[in-house]
Amino acid sequence: MEGNMMEMFEVGPCEDDFHLGFLIGQRFRDQIRSRLAGDLILQNQLLPFARTTQAQPLIKALSETNQNKFPRYWDELLGTAEGSGVPILQIILVNLRKEILPFISKAAMNSNADTADDCSDILIVGDSMAIAAHNEDANVALVGHTYLIKGKLSNGLSFVAYTYAGELPSCAFGFNSQGLAFTLNSVPPAEAEIVPAGIGRNFVSRDLLEATSITDALDRRMILNVETASRSRVSVHEVGTTPFFHANMYLHLQVQQIRLLCSRVIPTTLSSPTLALVPSYQNFLVSPFQGKSTSPPP
């Protein structure tokens, strides 16, 4: 089974962000190229759409918006493309797929479309424990195409991030040396809520890896559930002793959203015995921070 263990790649400090991305792309060149070649969403939907006249202004605007907001992470993305030998367009498309797919006509979509029911969490905080149990769901193209990045930055901060091949760390979950951890769940807004050319979620989550605090969260045990949407809308829920379940629906931020079938049968709170099934998550999320568990899962 040793050959199936997920690899952790330690990288940095680097001379610049392009070099950081280049080393990651170079190290995981085969996995990145294999993932992109077998990703039916990329091959059958994103790439054909990118060749249309309708897509050109959208992709250009998305690229400019995210490059201007996060120039360092954009350079990291360019480095990943260079290091892996993959066309930069493909790297851009997989990193911004959630922001592009809503603009592909339903007629062009097929059964391989990206689904909204990605990932879920159970959260609980008590006097003697703080647990964040995360279930990572994703497209089948990612099977065997993920890895862990342990990045060390020139300012002394370091992070560990579960990373999809070819994407910025991390659109899944991660934690850093400041004691801050996060997990991510996809939430599907209604079509009227979608703003073109906005900030990509991959860039937001990459920035979370370098965050140093959430108010006084580093001074006490805290888990926050943070829901965000376009137009700078945000809602924060502090998890307490009542177990809190979050999957792929907005629970406390008032947003028009797509109603998923599973939301009718999954309760928003679960009884305490359910947590007995996932004790290992407590060690994974708490012990790296020496007892601190600061996890804001958007």
Image (spheres, grey):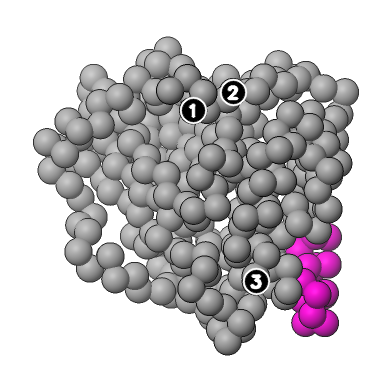
The local crowd at label 1, few if under 14, some if 14 to 19, many if 20 or more residues have their Cα within 10 Å, is few
> What residue is shown with label 3?
45
Residue 266 is one of the magenta-drawn residues: no
Q: Is residue 3 above or below residue 147?
A: above
Residue occupying image coordinates x 57% and y 19%: 177
State the residue in front, 152 or 243.
Answer: 152
Determine the secondary structure under disc 3.
helix
Of mark 2 and mark 3, the one earlier in the sequence is 2
Residue 160 vs residue 126: left or right? right
Q: Amino acid at mark 3?
A: Gln
Taking the image as drawn, is residue 58 in sight? Answer: no
Determine the secondary structure under disc 1.
helix
Question: Which segment did they paint magenta?
Answer: 50-64
> What residue is shown with label 1?
4
Residue 116 vs residue 127: left or right? right
Residue 137 vs residue 141: left or right? left
Report if the CB atoms under discs 2 and 3 are less than 8 Å apart: no
Residue occupying image coordinates x 39% and y 23%: 284
> What residue is shown with label 2?
8
Residue 220 percent location from the top left of the image: 39, 23
